[in-house]
């Protein structure tokens, strides 16, 4: 049996992992899906990246979880990398699912294509609380293009605005490279949330992990909605010893 802690990405919250959690539990495993600080509807958005990291560290420690398979999706990859620096003895493996693998001294913002950086900065400046809401056309055609229109609309309605600061905070990340925790990269072969090519997920992000297990599956950036059972099974493949 494995113990999973699933860390969501931008605009998401822990509840979005629900179908994946249920499938993992059906297969005999334990899965936790906490919500990162500053994420979700009707919560304070004035958070730093350190606040995001602390919220996951605190969850793991308070629940006394050990031998954890820590999974990060998208923005969650930057959180997972920093959590690993703080509580390495509680972790068995790191899994980056189409996730950002941060670089020391850099922010996630620097890994975004210029058109995303420009758009997010504009949207945050126009908002009342320094947050960014992903426009629906981008969600529909770049994030969840393997869903029908009804599912795309229903899932979009559950998203919440993303605080900009955690994306722009520079991460020291001085200890991550030396950690001996095994690592996997799970790549969705049709994931176009980052444009394929120069800015794509794989091998740009996966290549930063050094020695790692590469697992691939068909589907978009949002297979937790469009194929949660398949995602759960690929997470198991990513997590096995």
Image (spheres, helix red, strand yellow):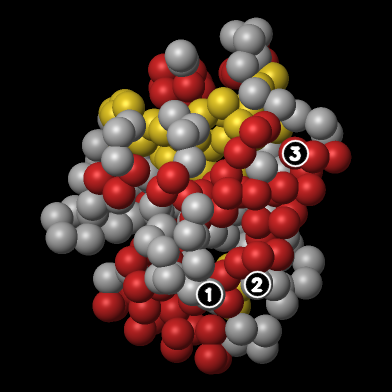
Give the Cα distance between marks 2 and 1. Answer: 7 Å
Residue wearing tag 3: 60
Q: Is residue 199 visible?
A: yes
Residue in the image at 14% along x and 55% along y: 197
Relative image position of residue 134 (x, y in whole percent): 48, 68
Position in image of residue 83 (x %, y %)? 61, 49
Residue drawn at the location 41% of the way across and 17% of the way down? 237
Q: Looking at the image, is 224 positioned above or below residue 232?
A: below
The residues tagged by marks 1 and 3 sit, at their Cα atoms, a distance apart of: 23 Å
Q: Quadrant of residue 238?
A: top left
Q: Position of residue 99 (x, y in %)?
A: 41, 48
Is disc 2 placed on a helix, strand or loop?
Answer: loop
Left or right position of 166 against 197: right
As rendered, which of 131 and 99 lies closer to the eye?
99
Q: Check the image and report above or below for 67 versus 1.
A: below
Read off the residue under disc 1.
169
Residue 48, which numbered label? Answer: 2
Q: Secondary structure at mark 3?
A: helix
Q: Residues within 10 Å of mark 2 (few under 14, many from 20)?
A: some
Q: Nearer the viewer, residue 190 or 238?
A: 238
Q: Position of residue 206 (x, y in %)?
A: 29, 43
Q: Which of pointers 2 and 1 lies earlier in the amino acid sequence? A: 2
Mark 1 nearby-residue class (10 Å; few <14, some 14–19, many ≥20): some
Extreme right residue here? 62
What residue lies at 19% left-to-right and 53% top-to-bottom?
Answer: 196
């Amino acid at each position: 049996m494995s113990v999973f802690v699933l860390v969501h990405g931008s605009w998401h919250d822990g509840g979005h992992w629900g179908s994946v959690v249920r499938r993992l539990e059906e297969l005999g495993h334990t899965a936790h899906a906490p919500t990162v600080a500053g994420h979700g509807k009707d919560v304070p958005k004035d958070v730093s990246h350190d606040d995001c990291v602390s919220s996951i560290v605190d969850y793991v420690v308070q629940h006394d979880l050990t031998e954890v398979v820590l999974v990060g999706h998208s923005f969650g990859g930057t959180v997972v990398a920093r959590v690993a620096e703080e509580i390495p003895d509680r972790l068995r493996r790191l899994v980056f699912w189409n996730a950002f693998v941060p670089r020391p001294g850099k922010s996630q913002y620097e890994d975004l294509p210029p058109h995303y950086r420009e758009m997010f900065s504009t949207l945050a400046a126009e908002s009342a609380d320094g947050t960014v809401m992903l426009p629906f056309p981008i969600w529909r055609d770049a994030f969840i293009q393997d869903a029908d229109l009804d599912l795309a609309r229903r899932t979009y309605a559950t998203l919440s605005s993303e605080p900009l600061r955690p994306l722009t905070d520079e991460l020291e990340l001085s200890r991550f490279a030396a950690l001996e925790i095994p690592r996997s990269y799970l790549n969705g072969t049709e994931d176009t949330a980052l444009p394929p090519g120069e800015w794509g997920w794989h091998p740009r992000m996966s290549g930063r992990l050094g020695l790692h297990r590469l697992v691939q599956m068909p589907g978009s950036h949002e297979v937790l909605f469009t194929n949660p059972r398949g995602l759960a099974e690929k997470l198991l493949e990513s997590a096995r010893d």
